Image: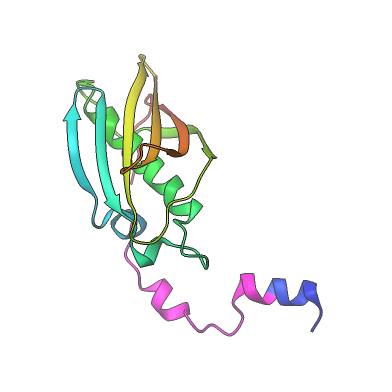
Amino acid sequence: MDLLESVKRFLENEDGENESTIDSMPAKFIEPIVAQGLKVDLVEPGRLICSLKVPPRLVDAGNRLHGGAMATLLDLLTSVVFHTAELGTFHSGVSVEINISFVDVAVLGEEIEIESKVLRVGKMICVASVELRKKETGKIIAQGRHTKYLGIRSRV
């Protein structure tokens, strides 16, 4: 089998080995997988600080916190911090932009701190930032920003 065919088989999972398990998963299953074990250290209007000991389910082959897990934490915790901003009839909104810069790693068993802050609340747009740090040293692991459009309500 050539390289391109092996890439295709990997992505399409043609043997169907996990198909029934994946198809039977409930909607919105990813947040509980990533957020399990998260501790809220501080919550105040427009600001949220949480901590998490990096669990085996969120690491890559090198036992480092997976970038996808960090991006999901960014999405989840910035979405939650909007609720602390006392927006009145707030609803979840729709993501307009999410960006993240990875500058260091956290390893299996290491405790991290995630701080999310509301930067701007407008009539239709909210913006929040997030910083993931090593809890022991304060060294930054990743930084990001999330912009949401609040003008429509989800039909889901």
In the rendered view, would you say 30 is above or below 57? above
Residue 18, magenta (yes or no): yes
Q: How has the structure been colored for display?
A: rainbow
Numbered label tally:
0
In the rendered view, would you say 13 is above or below 110? below
Image check: 69 left or right of 102? left
What percent of the width, then of the height, locates residue 114?
A: 33, 39
What percent of the width, then of the height, locates residue 68?
A: 48, 53
* In-front residue for pair 150/11: 11
Instruction: Name which residue lies at 79% across and 74% down.
Output: 3
Residues shaded magenta: 9-29
Instruction: Name which residue lies at 51% across and 38% down.
Output: 100
What percent of the width, then of the height, locates residue 25?
A: 35, 69
In the rendered view, would you say 123 is above or below 98? above
* In-front residue for pair 28/53: 53
To which quarter of the image does residue 41 belong? top left
Residue furthest to the top: 122
Residue 156, magenta (yes or no): no
Residue furthest to the right: 2
What percent of the width, then of the height, locates residue 1?
A: 79, 84
